[in-house]
Amino acid sequence: MKYTASLVKLNIDERIATLRKDALERGIPVADEETLNFLLLTLAATKPKRILEIGTAVGLSAAAMLKACPSAQVTTIELEEERYLEAKKNFVELGVSDRVNAYLGDAGEILSMMNGQFDFVFLDGPKAQYEKYLFDIKRLLTNGGVLFADDVLLYGWVSGVEPTPPKRHSIVEKIRSYLDVVTSDRDFITSVLDVGDGVALSVYWKN
Ligand SMILES: C[S@@+](CC[C@H](N)C(=O)[O-])C[C@H]1O[C@@H](n2cnc3c(N)ncnc32)[C@H](O)[C@@H]1O
């Protein structure tokens, strides 16, 4: 384990921690502890009211974000029906369902039809689509809004610290392209951080 990850003492609702452990044991992808801790830190610093999440899985990051931001609403999108239904059940059990708008479907399609403004976006869906989603995310973000994109270093393959397995070259190139586009976009201030599996933290900052 990375030294920085070993220092994380994640402080989340006990019921979310239990559901998270259960999801991990069943092979459901959930944000790792270092990332989740940093996500909660970012939320504590920015206090968003309207959060958009791409990639609900079974709703654990959404529930953790809602617990961390008691007056926020989360809109979250998931492609797989089974996960979406489990997330809906978890939102009810965790007492946050009245603050969640959960969509079932392809994030690309749903984002293109969405209106309104969000002050925080947690981008945690299909990594190969991050760049494609950027146009709509930018349209949906308030000035000063935060874009938190997870898994952008992908096991060290993206930075080249670890060799990319032959079948993963395409996704690695797509993530590199996302990082190039978002760091070059003058409407964003971005730092790419070696937190968890890599986080690109951007602020939409149009003067
Ligand atoms: C890393 S997981 C999300 C984990 C969740 N944010 C958490 O930390 O608890 C990514 C999710 O994105 C979903 N996904 C994949 N392709 C998608 C798409 N095109 N549209 C919406 N969701 C998608 C996957 O089914 C998966 O559940």
Image: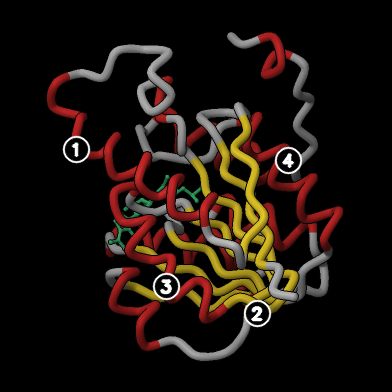
Vertical side of 59 occupied by 199: above or below = above
Query: Picture quarter containing residue 106?
Result: bottom left
**Disc 4 marks which residue?**
14
**Which callout, 1 or 4, points to the residue nearer the camera?**
1
Alpha carbon of mark 2 to alpha carbon of mark 4: how far?
20 Å
Helix, strand or loop for disc 2: helix
N-term-proximal mark, 2 vs 4: 4
In the image, which disc is placed on residue 98? 2
x 31%, y 71%: residue: 108
Query: Residue 107, relative to residue 158: is it above or below?
Result: below
Of pointers 3 and 2, the one earlier in the residue sequence: 2
Quadrant in the rendering for residue 204: bottom right
Identify the amino acid type marked 1.
Ser
Amino acid identity at mark 3: Phe
Q: Which mark is residue 170?
A: 1
- For label 3, the residue is 135
User: Looking at the image, do the residues carrying marks 1 and 2 touch, with CB atoms under 8 Å apart?
Assistant: no
